[in-house]
Image (cartoon, rainbow, N blue to C red):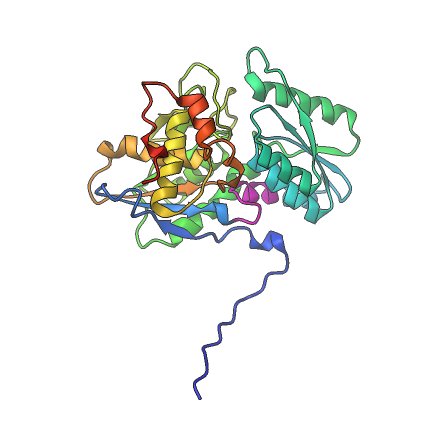
Amino acid sequence: MQHSEVIHNSTLKNVIDSIGNTPLIELNRVFAASNFKVYGKMEAANPSGSLKDRTSVNILKEALLLGYIKPGDTIIESSSGNMALGLAQACLYFKLKLIVVVDPKINSHTKKLLNAYGAKIEYVTKPDPEKGFLGARLQRVHELLENIPNSFWTNQYGNKKNPEAHLVTMKEMFGALEDPLDYLFVTVSTCGTLMGCADYISQNRLKTKLIAVDALGSILFGDEKSNRLIPGHGSSVKSNFLDKNFVHDAVKVSDLECVKGCWSLLKNEGILAGGSTGGAISAINKYADSIPKGSSCGMIICDRGERYLDTIYSSDWILDNFNSKDNNLSFLNNE
């Protein structure tokens, strides 16, 4: 009698322990026409669906360990989506309350998820005249901290545990490859992920060239501030982490280029990802002529695309926002 092979999988103690060790996927279809390889770190596989799971837990664990917070206290954070969801999951596990300060760009799917997690949502409806919606959100965070006892700001914009979390992300990515990457493309917002990657490259004396992917209308890499439709990357205020001495180059991507990148990744690889990931796909294509033949490149698939079904993956939304004679929307055709 033939017995089937028994596979023994290790068990984890809790959902927090399932964060990290995400797959590294060769994206050999979406870049089939290129003469270099691209690998995507599938951070969308984290339990709440994004890279920010790592950041959230890294910050909360230290705050609990040092006694800055205890079960029952209130966590406050400004977020456009992913950090909010990472915190919402972790706060439930650690028995903490959560208030998330958001602006009108938050999408409906993210709001529904936050409600399901039991987070309280605070809305900012008017941008700060100088610092945009992010500036207005941060002002509201400080107001809440002053008025709510036993409250704590995780401060993804300045807490050193943000970039530190991504030393592990990079250790996983580089450990899965035989040789170090030649290029690493990282989308930027707080710049915590970017500088965590930079720290890993520097500490290990790697020759990997770090390429920042920024949004048109973001001030991080030299644009004047302007309105952006897609949340999650770019910023209207300066980063507390960014040190451009560790960044080889930067590529700017438009909202439409983010959309096109998302659709290309979906149609070619079957991966439904969020807007910043689409931005990275388009950035690599824009930078392709500067990448030597035979190079290896890395990028991060930052989050899941389900929360963008009403925007990036909606033909109606795309036509409402980008339907002009100057924009090629042929990717909407079912080919």
Q: Measured along the vertical axis of the image, is residue 135 above or below residue 275?
A: above
Task: Find residue 254 and report its horizontal and vertical position in percent.
Answer: 39, 24
At horizontal 44% and vertical 89% (from top left) the residue drawn is: 1
Q: Quadrant of the C terminus?
A: top left
Q: Is residue 321 visible?
A: yes
Residue 131 is a magenta residue: no
Task: Find residue 208 and report its horizontal and vertical position in percent.
Answer: 32, 40
At horizontal 63% and vertical 37% (from top left) the residue drawn is: 112
Q: How many marks?
A: 0
Residue 17 lies in quadrant: bottom right
User: In the drawing, does residue 61 fall left or right of residue 175?
Assistant: right
Q: Residue furthest right?
A: 149
Task: Find residue 85 and report its horizontal and vertical position in percent.
Answer: 60, 39
Q: Residue furthest bottom?
A: 1
Q: Measured along the vertical axis of the image, is residue 93 above or below residue 34?
A: below
Task: Find residue 10 and report its horizontal and vertical position in percent.
Answer: 55, 66
- Front position in the image: 263 or 121: 263
Residue 13 lies in quadrant: bottom right
- Front position in the image: 89 or 174: 89
At horizontal 61% and vertical 31% (from top left) the residue drawn is: 155
- Front position in the image: 63 or 146: 146
Q: Over which residues does the magenta segment extend? A: 46-58
Q: Is residue 220 visible?
A: no
User: In the drawing, does residue 154 fall left or right of residue 146?
Assistant: left
